[in-house]
Amino acid sequence: GSGDELEGWLRELAREVTPLRLCDEALQRDYHGLLASLGAEAATLDSVLDCFEGTPDSGGQEGSGVDLPRPDLLKLHELLVSGHEERSPRLAARLAKAPLFPTLEGVMCPLVGAGRALLPRDEAIVALAPQAPWLTEEPLTRELARSLVEPLGADAVARTLLLEGDQEPLFDPLAEGPRSEALGYLVEHADALSEEVLARLATAPLWRDEVGEERPLGEHGVVDEALPASDELAALYRGVSFLQSPLAAEDRALAQALGLADELVPLSLGRLLE
């Protein structure tokens, strides 16, 4: 079973890398009951995590923060993937906090908390925020990560645009390039956004008019291009209206693609005269 495989992996690793003090295999096999009665502790996955988390071990000493060679790390990931159904919630939480997950740059990180490696939902979000600490593309590692945390996708992009969340933002939401690309990403993944998130996006000062002013959608207007002299009407609003200005064409298209066009104020000559 996966327990026997983990024990074999531990024995191989303990010869060279970890500070685990393992009983002689023959002695353990022949005198297992006696050893247990004397208080010998079984080497478990918790023992492994003590080594890599730097948490106190059974002797009250700090763990060593061991750096696993890549083949041994992948073997551990393979064992954890194969035995994930036997994993308790407590052990899953410890695994997610352990620095056992390399980023694309090879930095070992946990999956939660400060300094975490990020699990992407797709490669498009990696391209959107290439500087973020994305998890390695190694299939076994990503499979293990998916059993422990939710991948980041449209909701994470929306939170960055809305300046929400307690983690480092994926990108600079105030920069023009990332902002437009992020809104484009949300258009492609609109079905993954809840009505509540869409409503927050509509009321956030993200949307630019033709001169670059950012306001909530409800403070922008849109001129129906089918109206006679629509260009002249838009020009009037540019010069006169300080509360509602024509939304930039790109942002209007994004709002429509996200199903938010109803938030826009229809501009007309009558409204201007009011």
Image: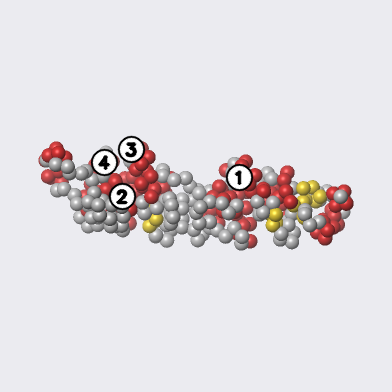
User: What's the CA distance linking mark 1 and mark 2?
Assistant: 37 Å
Measure how far apart labels 2 and 4 are at the Cα level.
Answer: 15 Å
| Sequence-earlier tag: 3 or 4 | 4
Which comes before the other along the chain, label 3 or label 1?
3
Residue 197 bears which disc, if any?
1
* Mark found first going from the N terminus, 4 or 1: 4
The residue pinned by badge 2 equals 49
In the rendering, at what x and y percent does residue 163 appear?
Answer: 58, 54
Would you identify the image quadrant in which residue 39 lies? top left
Residue 156 visible in image: yes
Describe the element under mark 3 as helix, strand or loop.
Answer: helix
As helix, strand or loop, the secondary structure at mark 2 comes to helix
Mark 2 or 3, which is nearer the eye? 2
Mark identifier at residue 68: none
Of residues 172 and 177, the one nearer the viewer is 172
Disc 3: which residue: 86
Left or right of residue 262: residue 82: left
* SS type, badge 1: helix
Label 2 or label 4, whichever comes before in sequence order: 4
- The structure residue drawn at horizontal position 34% and vertical position 43%, both measured from the top left corner, is 91
Look at label 3 and name its amino acid.
Glu
Q: Examine the rendered structure and indicate whether residue 41 appears above or below residue 272.
A: above
Distance from the alpha carbon under mark 4 to that under mark 1:
44 Å
Q: Please identify, in this view, whether the residue under mark 2 or under mark 4 is nearer the observer.
A: 2
What's the residue type where badge 1 is placed? Answer: Val
Instruction: Give the residue number, with chain letter if any, for mark 4.
Output: 3
**Eye-nearest disc, 3 or 1:** 1
Question: Disc 2 marks which amino acid?
Answer: Leu
Q: Residues within 10 Å of mark 1 (few under 14, many from 20)?
A: some
